[in-house]
């Protein structure tokens, strides 16, 4: 038997030596849980994948995290290799903590589903259907009698065997659709590093390991994420230059893939890595050029412009306008570390509370109280919470807030 951590210990240790874990299914809060016993289950992965996770991503990322990323105060400067390493870790983080096999079954059939939906929409609008435009990017290798679990393990191993980029995955003989698709999503996005604002509020962590924000206006039931696309469509309708049209079409495709506003990955109790949708970089550059752009308040609950500022790039080789970038190992990617205010971190944590399977974790309940209460307020009628924290509200009421109306 192998004790597998579906949330890496290297991350859990950055929260605390011992964690508090709340089980949303039983309503039980356990405190002072050693990291070794948190977010772990026997034989969650097969033995080969368990070894590869440590050897081919966790040890390298853990070294970068401990010796550099968490030691930086105002600015983080990454080499191209380090940037690939971080995005590979995030790619694994998205796919490693899946509970149940249904998700991978959906991923396996993603392109068939996409083709079917596109065909129905074309028929509805009475326009020709371009089958090639919606075809899978490659013919996936078929392995006889492969189970969904084995397909999941194959997906993780393809990523672990490569640098995690779409190009690297495409060259792997056992490549899978989810490995390639999610690599495209993550590598198209840009990074942000967001910090907790004070000693009172800290980031929480769940058994999913990450969360995301959909466009403002989500009612807890239906997710549309159409506002960013609507803006790009309006620009395409007005564009006259062919190159400009092609760029808008490219952005529309990327935005349809990374449909959320941002994805968040806590790397300690005080810092998280944020993957920000490419749309926001385009929006920022368009705004700097003096063009009209949709307001952040229209799209997101976090409308702090500074949080979406893109990183600064320093390229070793000269770049020629209109040509493909010339990359070099000595290129640098510079990120200003941004600090959230109390309202922003509590909202971010509420998003974590909303996307969970079984366990919510934090360094101590004291540092999570504000976020837990925030989640309750965000889900007051008419909104419908995904997760019932009634038992945890009662614990907070008895311990901290005698007058809290739960």
Image (cartoon, rainbow, N blue to C red):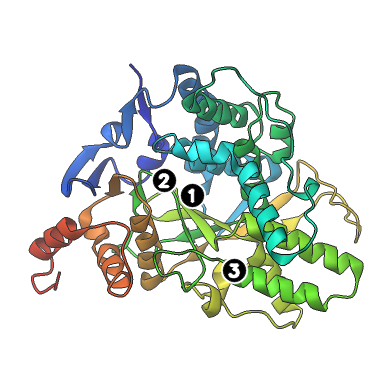
First along the sequence among labels 3 and 1? 1
Which image quadrant: the N terminus?
top left
Which percent across, then down, holds residue 290?
75, 83
User: Going by the image, does 316 lie left or right of 97?
Assistant: right
* C-alpha span from label 1 to label 2: 22 Å
Q: CA distance from mark 3 to mark 1?
A: 39 Å
* Figure quadrant of residue 232: bottom right
Tell me which residue sits at (29%, 48%) in the image.
361
- Along the line of sight, which residue is nearer the eye, 264 or 25? 25
Could you tell me residue 152's position as x and y percent?
51, 30
Relative depth, front residue between 125 and 264: 125
Q: Quadrant of the C terminus?
A: bottom left
How many dots with numbers?
A: 3
Q: Residue 226 got which mark? A: 3
Q: Quick check: can you spot residue 27?
A: yes
Q: Which residue is mark 1?
A: 71
Residue 209 tag number: 2
Give the image quarter of residue 40.
top left
**Disc 2 to disc 3, how far (Cα)?**
26 Å
Q: Secondary structure at mark 1?
A: loop
Looking at the picture, does residue 396 appear above or below residue 102? below
Closer mark to the observer between disc 2 and disc 3 = 3
Q: Position of residue 319 (x, y in %)?
A: 88, 55
Question: Who's the residue at 65% across and 60% down the image?
Answer: 255
- Packing grade of label 2 (10 A; few <14, some 14-19, many >=20) is many
The answer to whether any part of residue 284 appears in the image is: no
Left or right: residue 404 versus residue 379 is left
Q: Nearer the viewer, mark 1 or mark 2?
A: 2
Please tell me in which quadrant of the rendered image residue 294 appears: bottom right
Q: Measuring 61% from the left and 36% from the top, which residue is drawn there?
A: 179
């Amino acid at each position: 038997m192998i004790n597998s951590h579906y949330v890496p210990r290297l991350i859990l240790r950055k929260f605390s030596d011992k964690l508090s874990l709340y089980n949303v299914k039983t309503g039980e809060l356990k405190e002072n849980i050693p990291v070794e016993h948190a977010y772990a289950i026997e034989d969650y992965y097969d033995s080969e994948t368990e070894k590869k996770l440590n050897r081919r991503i966790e040890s390298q990322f853990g070294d970068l995290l401990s010796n550099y990323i968490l030691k930086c105060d105002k600015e983080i400067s990454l080499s191209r290799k380090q940037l690939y390493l971080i995005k590979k870790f995030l790619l694994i983080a998205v796919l490693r903590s899946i509970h149940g096999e249904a998700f991978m079954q959906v991923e396996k059939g993603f392109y068939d589903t996409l083709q079917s939906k596109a065909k129905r929409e074309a028929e509805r609008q009475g326009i020709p259907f371009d089958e090639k435009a919606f075809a899978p990017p490659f013919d996936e290798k078929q392995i006889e009698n492969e189970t969904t679990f084995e397909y999941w393990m194959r997906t993780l191993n393809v990523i672990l065997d490569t640098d995690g980029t779409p190009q690297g995955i495409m060259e792997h003989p056992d490549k899978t659709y989810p490995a390639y698709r999610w690599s495209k999503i993550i590598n198209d996005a840009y990074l942000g590093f967001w910090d907790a604002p004070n000693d009172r509020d800290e980031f929480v962590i769940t058994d999913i390991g990450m969360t995301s924000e959909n466009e403002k206006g989500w009612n807890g039931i239906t997710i549309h994420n159409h506002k960013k696309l609507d803006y790009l469509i309006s620009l395409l309708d007005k564009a006259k230059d062919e190159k400009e049209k092609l760029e808008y079409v490219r952005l529309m495709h990327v935005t349809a893939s990374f449909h959320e506003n941002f994805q968040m990955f806590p790397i300690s109790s005080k810092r998280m890595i944020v993957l920000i949708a490419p749309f926001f970089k385009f929006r920022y550059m368009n705004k700097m050029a003096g063009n009209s752009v949709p307001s952040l308040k229209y799209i997101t609950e976090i409308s702090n412009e500074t949080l979406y500022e893109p990183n600064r790039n320093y390229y070793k080789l000269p770049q020629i306008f209109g040509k493909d970038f010339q990359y070099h190992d000595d290129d640098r990617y510079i990120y200003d570390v941004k600090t959230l205010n109390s309202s922003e971190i509590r909202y971010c944590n509420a998003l974590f509370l909303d996307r969970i399977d079984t366990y919510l974790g934090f360094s101590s309940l004291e540092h999570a109280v504000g976020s837990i209460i925030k989640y309750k307020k965000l889900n007051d009628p008419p909104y419908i919470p995904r997760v019932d924290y009634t038992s945890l509200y009662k614990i907070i009421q008895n311990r901290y807030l005698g007058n809290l109306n739960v």
